[in-house]
Image (tube, rainbow, N blue to C red):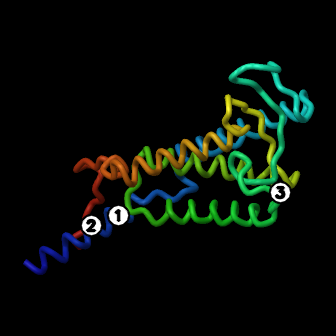
């Protein structure tokens, strides 16, 4: 019985190693994060190129494009501390990469959540490093002006909470018998 338990533990450890995909080989995560970052940077570039600060298109209405910059965090919170926020962005990116790597098995939804968070963090990090502030332009009602990166971070946080707290079973991959690692009995 002990020998059987030890063998099963060995199988579980081997399966865990085989199911752990390095972040640089995770094309789903990579493509989503790069797409979010590229879309964020492209839209910010277009706003900076074709609008002036404070301009709104249309001038009135519930949904507008309004060129605004801020030195704070998501939705303009905590302004005036760009160096601290730049360092916090780097720490957040490193923590997300560590979180990804520390998971034994990672589901599709959890990978999407991490990718959205990484893409958004990288997008705003690029602005902070290159300009000392973040370009915002999405203006919806009474909500603070935000950008694509802020949207991705918000969606990523929401999905991360759903996958890890509300429905933790959805954060686990569906493993079939074929997904387990082969055992070498030699």
Measure the alpha-carbon separation of dots 2 and 3.
44 Å
First in sequence: mark 2 vs mark 3: 2
Q: Nearer the viewer, residue 114 or 61?
A: 61
**Residue hosting label 1:** 16
**In the figure, is residue 120 to the left or right of 79?**
left
**Residue hosting label 3:** 129
Q: Secondary structure at mark 2?
A: helix
Q: Nearer the viewer, residue 49 or 174?
A: 49
Mark 1 surroundings: few (<14), some (14-19) or many (≥20) residues within 10 A: some
Mark 2 surroundings: few (<14), some (14-19) or many (≥20) residues within 10 A: some
Q: Secondary structure at mark 1?
A: helix
- Kindly check if marks 2 and 3 are in contact, taking CB atoms under 8 A apart as contact: no
Give the position of the N terminus as an image quadrant: bottom left
Indicate the position of residue 48 as horizontal and vertical percent values: 88, 35
- Kindly check if marks 2 and 1 are in contact, taking CB atoms under 8 A apart as contact: yes
Q: Nearer the viewer, residue 32 or 14?
A: 32
Q: Residue at x 62, y 65 (%)?
A: 94
The answer to whether 46 is drawn above or below residue 107 in the figure is: above
First in sequence: mark 3 vs mark 1: 1
Closer to the observer: label 3 or label 1?
A: 3
Q: Residue at x 86, y 53 (%)?
A: 130
**In the figure, is residue 8 to the left or right of 34?**
left
Mark 3 surroundings: few (<14), some (14-19) or many (≥20) residues within 10 A: few
Q: Secondary structure at mark 3?
A: helix
Q: Residue furthest bottom?
A: 2
Indicate the position of residue 16 as horizontal and vertical percent values: 35, 64
- Kindly check if marks 3 and 1 are in contact, taking CB atoms under 8 A apart as contact: no
In the picture, the disc for residue 12 is: 2
Give the position of the C terminus as an image quadrant: bottom left
Q: Residue at x 82, y 20 (%)?
A: 59
Measure the alpha-carbon separation of dots 3 and 1.
38 Å
């Amino acid at each position: 019985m002990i020998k059987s338990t030890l063998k099963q533990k060995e199988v579980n450890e081997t399966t865990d190693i085989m199911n752990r995909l390095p972040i640089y080989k995770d094309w789903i995560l990579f493509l989503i994060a790069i797409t979010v970052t590229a879309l964020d940077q492209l839209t910010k570039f277009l706003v900076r190129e074709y609008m002036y600060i404070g301009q709104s298109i249309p001038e009135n209405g519930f949904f507008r494009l309004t060129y605004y910059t801020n030195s704070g965090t998501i939705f303009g919170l905590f302004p005036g501390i760009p160096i601290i926020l730049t360092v916090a962005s780097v720490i957040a990116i490193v923590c997300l990469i560590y979180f990804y790597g520390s998971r034994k098995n990672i589901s599709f939804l959890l990978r999407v959540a991490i990718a959205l968070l990484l893409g958004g963090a990288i997008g705003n990090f690029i602005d902070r490093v290159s300009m000392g502030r973040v370009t915002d332009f999405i203006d919806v009602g009474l909500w603070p002006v935000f950008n694509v990166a802020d949207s991705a971070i918000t969606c990523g946080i929401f999905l991360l909470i759903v996958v890890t707290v509300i429905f933790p079973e959805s954060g686990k991959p569906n493993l079939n018998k074929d997904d387990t690692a082969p055992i070498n009995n030699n």
